[in-house]
Amino acid sequence: MSVRRFTGAKIVVFGGPGVGKTAFVVRYMTKRYIGDYDRNKEMLYNHKIPSPRDDVTLEIIDTAANDSTEHKENHIKWGDGFVFIYSITDKSSYEYAYTLKDMLVKQRGQEIPAVVIANKCDLLSVRKVSDSEGTTLAEQLNCPKFDVSVADGYSGVSEAMDELVIQLKREFVKHCSQAAVVANDKTKSKLFTFKKGFKKRISRSHSDTV
Ligand SMILES: Nc1nc2c(ncn2[C@@H]2O[C@H](COP(=O)(O)OP(=O)(O)OP(=O)(O)O)[C@@H](O)[C@H]2O)c(=O)[nH]1
Ligand SMILES: [Mg+2]
């Protein structure tokens, strides 16, 4: 029997304008922070995580905040896992993330792999979004929240992405075992039909001989 392995997943990075989506993705993939990126440009990246068994390839979409609703819905359909970023210095970016969370939950439910990123934590003196507001967003997505400063370091970014990959693996295993149960049920039902047919044939041939 062939064993299915987790070899990759699709990740969508959602967030309002200027919250640090591109900085986050670039930091995760290269460990570097450049500070100035093409604004409002959607990009698809492939990122390979080496592993002793099978390499895992993540496809990551860095979205543009001004996408149409239809485009966002397509991203929600496409993704296996989601990163919701807002900036703690920008209340409207929190509201933007909250609206996207509602869209995700409506389309895909609450049990989707996700993480919430409260970015720009190096700018605490100009905080506009409270810690508890961020926690509420994460609770509604049933996922953890990470307070990070993409500008200041790599560790918070990698911790958040590692957590998302763990959730994605868990989801993959869940799907595999559900598929195995369905396959097992189908085999059982085929066997049952076969046994029924076999019994009928035996009783028919028995009555033929009487
Ligand atoms: N102080 C601070 N600035 C940050 C941080 N992360 C990103 N920035 C800055 O915020 C600005 C926007 O960052 P981007 O990564 O381009 O944001 P974005 O969400 O991709 O923006 P759009 O693509 O235009 O929606 C840039 O000037 C970054 O340098 C952070 O953690 N702290
Ligand atoms: Mg960007």
Image (cartoon, rainbow, N blue to C red):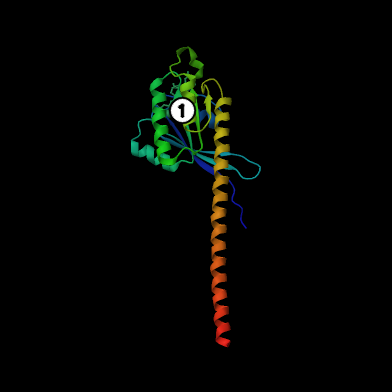
Q: Is residue 177 above or below residue 167?
A: below
Q: Is residue 98 left or right of residue 25?
A: left
Q: Which residue is mark 1?
A: 137
On screen, residue 195 above or below 29: below
Task: Write the residue at 61% across / 53% down.
Answer: 3
Which residue type does callout 1 highlight? Leu
Q: Quadrant of the C terminus?
A: bottom right
Of 159 and 198, nearer the camera is 198
Choose top left, top right, bottom left or bottom right for residue 71. top left
Residue farthest right in this picture: 52
Quarter of the rendering occupied by the N terminus: bottom right
- Number of labels in the image equals 1
Residue drawn 40% across and 20% down?
91
Name the spot of residue 155 as percent of width and height, x first.
58, 25
Q: Is residue 17 in sight in this rendering?
A: no
Image quadrant of ligand 2?
A: top left
Q: Nearer the viewer, residue 26 or 181?
A: 181
The crowd level at tag 1 (other Cα within 10 Å; few <14, some 14-19, many 20+) is: many
Q: Is residue 87 above or below residue 46?
A: above
- Residue 48: x %, y % from top left: 56, 39
Q: Residue at x 43, y 37 (%)?
A: 105
Q: Give the structural element (helix, strand or loop) at label 1.
A: helix
Picture coordinates of residue 45 (x, y %)? 48, 37
Q: Residue at x 54, y 63 (%)?
A: 189
